[in-house]
Image: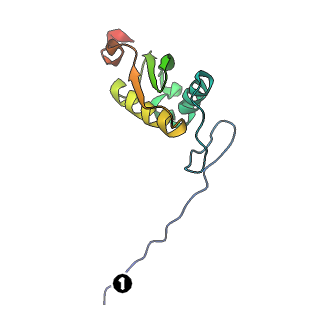
Amino acid sequence: MPATYRRERSFLPVPTTRHHRAISASISPLDLTEANIKQVLDDARVELAQLFDTSVGITGKVELADLDGPYMKIRIGGKIWHKRSTVLSRLGNYLKQRISAILEVDIEDEKQLDDSPENF
């Protein structure tokens, strides 16, 4: 009779220091304010570190460009590791998760989604 193996799941604790805060479903959504959006964009640099890894020369910056009620536009500049459209999508999801009143996250200018090296 062949041996069967059962793999036990191991869950490692997620560090929750000042520089790395775990996002969970239990965190209350923030109010929709410019200050909160800027804070969440700063938090995203830590939480989505693979998008903004400065140790490999990634200089990408993301900023709030415009806020019109529940609709916001962001500005993307500098070198980005992933496709800019991917960064926009991931940041949009992250922002909506943290600030549930946001309905749409868009780019300030479509040219900012151009991944050509001359745009860095």
Q: Is residue 42 visible?
A: yes
Image vertical order of residue 108 relative to residue 26, above or below:
above
Q: What percent of the width, then of the height, locates residue 117?
A: 33, 13
Q: Is residue 55 left or right of residue 73?
A: right
Q: Residue furthest front?
A: 69
- As helix, strand or loop, the secondary structure at mark 1 comes to loop
Residue at 39% over, 23% down? 106
Identify which amino acid the numbered label 1 is placed on.
Answer: Ala
Q: Is residue 74 left or right of residue 19?
A: left
Which one is nearer the viewer's eye here, 47 or 75? Answer: 75
Residue at 62% over, 41% down? 21
Badge 1 crowding class, 10 Å Cα cut-off, few under 14, some 14 to 19, many 20 or more, is few
Which one is nearer the viewer's eye here, 30 or 118? Answer: 30
Q: Is residue 59 visible?
A: no
Image vertical order of residue 11 relative to residue 58, above or below:
below
Quadrant that contains the N terminus: bottom left
Q: What percent of the width, then of the height, locates residue 7?
A: 44, 72
Q: Determine which residue is flagged by label 1.
A: 3
Residue at 35% over, 31% down? 86
Q: What percent of the width, then of the height, locates residue 89?
A: 38, 32
Q: What percent of the width, then of the height, locates residue 84?
A: 36, 24
Q: Residue furthest bottom?
A: 1
